Amino acid sequence: MMDVSFEEWVDKGCPGDPGKPDPDKRRSQFYSAATLNGKAVKPREWLVHGLIPQKTVTLFGGDGGTGKSLLALQLAVAVASEGGWLGKGTKAGPVIYMSAEDDDDELHRRLADILRAERRNWDDTENLTLRSLAGEDALLAIESQVTLIRSELFKELERRAESESPALIVVDTLADVYPANENDRAKVRQFIGLLRGLALRQNCAVLLLGHPSLTGLSSGTGASGSTAWNNSVRSRLYLSRITDNGFEADPDRRVMTTMKANYGRIGEETHMKWQAGVFVAEASE
């Protein structure tokens, strides 16, 4: 029971509610830049160098059926088993993979294909934690009149992350976990801020999967909703089919393009082909 009125509780910054700011518990402080003199400059940390940075959110887009969920699961296995991903090295560590689209049986089938194709066994998935939310309420935030607050599922995810110290958290997909209008710039930035806060506190990368709008599909940018989605994340990847004037010569081929990279170069392409249930890297053309 509250010791103060609701109005006083709001005036105090909603103490006790982890989804709203508490002025007495802010991690940030003002400081003089001169205090940095003599301190070693920490190198930037990457989950996948040049593509997926640590301690922030990467938005990974692709039309339904292109294979982004499978590719993200391949990344999860690579990180958890200290392996490579599409010919690229990855940071090793525990992974939390949370899917609101695929049920447990589908995750099982895809993992079996990945392990068989990469000649691994189930012991290699010991550091991979799965959660299927298919058919359940998967919202990571609750919309109020003025802001977004973290849902009970978000708090549950963070508690799990605190116990496992993951290098990567995968959230599939944006449409299932985001509660507001995708064109609401303020709410979009707040939502990405919630996920980035999680990435910073847990010192991990957060990979958020999403679908492009019709405009994003036709333009080839993979964008969707407000431009705040692209502007708020530090990295954005887009998986697409390879077509020429609408003709798809090989339906098994895909290309992943770096659409945004605050810490690197945009436009990098990774070509791949689906075979035996997984994507395998090809030489870029």
Image (spheres, rainbow, N blue to C red):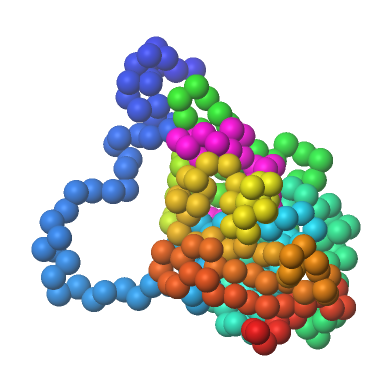
Residue 71 lies, in percent from the top left, at: 71, 68
Which of 240 and 119 lies nearest the eye of the viewer? 240
Q: Residue at x 38, y 72 (%)?
A: 44
| Residue 49 lies in the magenta-colored region | no
- Residue 165 is at least partly visible in this image: no
Q: Residue furthest front?
A: 245
- Residue 282 is at least partly visible in this image: yes
Residue 143 lies, in percent from the top left, at: 56, 29
Image-based side of 221 in relation to 281, left or right: left
Which of 114 and 224 lies nearest the eye of the viewer? 224
- Disc tally is 0
Q: Residue furthest left?
A: 34
Which of 283 and 30 lies nearest the eye of the viewer? 283
Q: Residue at x 58, y 63 (%)?
A: 237
Q: Residue at x 77, y 77 (%)?
A: 273
**Vertical placement of 103 versus 117: above or below?**
above
Residue 217 lies, in percent from the top left, at: 67, 53
Q: Residue at x 43, y 33 (%)?
A: 20
Q: Which residues are magenta?
A: 160-188
Residue 274 lies, in percent from the top left, at: 81, 75
